[in-house]
Image (cartoon, rainbow, N blue to C red):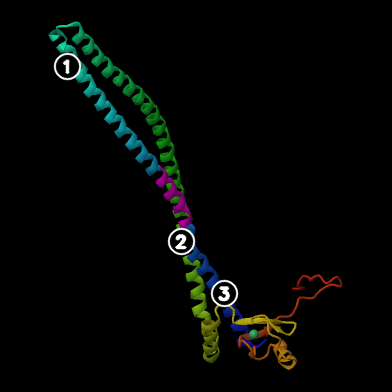
Amino acid sequence: MNEQLKFLIELQELDSAILSIAEKAESLPRKLEQYKTPLKEAHDAYQKANLSYDSLNKKKKDKDLKLDEIQDKVNKLKTRGSDIKTNKEYEAHLKEIQVFEKNMSDIEDEILVMMEEIDSFEKELKSEELKVKKAEEELKEQEVILGSEQKQFQADLDKEKAKRAEFVSRIKEEHYRSYMNLMDRLGDKVVVETKNEVCLGCNTNIPPQLYNDIRKNDELQHCFYCTRFLYYKESPPQDDQGQDLAPSA
Ligand SMILES: [Zn+2]
């Protein structure tokens, strides 16, 4: 095989490996994002429960105050009992106290219901708090895992890039320039195989004469359509069932 062609194929392999590592490294922040959503949801649920809990506590406090207020009134009424002269006045006085006391007993019932609700809200809050903690822990765990993956990717990238920098010097400048131009224009694969008279880069049929030349692998050839570098890969020898035979080496 033409030496420059061999180098270009190797350069393509190096660049594909570099691109694939870079892609994986770039996907890490998105992965971490996935663990931020459950934390936010747990946090929102906790906040919501906390708001309801606060407003219920406030309502209960208002009822407590109201209860004290009525209790004061009743106490005052009771001390005025000695000023009463007639039976009629006394009956009216008792009635007034009864109305207030009924009112108080209603409020006390309401407060009891609220206390039960507050109790169950406290349990809910605790469970929401646990969910928040769990989501926080999971996020932290993932940060550590993804952080070490990131480091590994970076180390792999540095290694591959160093290998590439050294390797590039073997390729003639004009070939390297046209390789890089193709890379800029087409992205990942610019040195591609041909198979059954087809360019595997753009799937265009290759004219028979050109295909014959490509099969020799002794010169740099380009697809007439997409202009990628083309080469031919010998199929491994097959047995009579069409199965690949293990390489004899
Ligand atoms: Zn092509």
**Where ligand 1 lies, by quadrant?**
bottom right
Name the foreground residue: 201 vs 47.
Answer: 47
Q: CA distance from mark 1 to mark 3?
A: 91 Å
- Image quadrant where residue 79 sits: top left
Asked if the magenta segment contains residue 145, the reply would be no
* Residue type indicated by callout 3: Ser
Q: Position of residue 132 (x, y in %)?
A: 42, 44
Magenta span of residues: 32-45
Residue 245 at x, y percent in the picture: 79, 71
Determine which of the numbered discs, if any, sits on residue 76 in the image: 1
Residue named by callout 2: 29
Mark 3 or 2, nearer chain start: 3
The CA distance from mark 2 to mark 1 is 70 Å
Rendered-image quadrant of the C terminus: bottom right
- Nearer to the camera, 178 or 110: 110
Give the quadrant of residue 49: top left
Q: Nearer the viewer, mark 3 or mark 2?
A: 2
Q: Residues within 10 Å of mark 3 (few under 14, many from 20)?
A: some
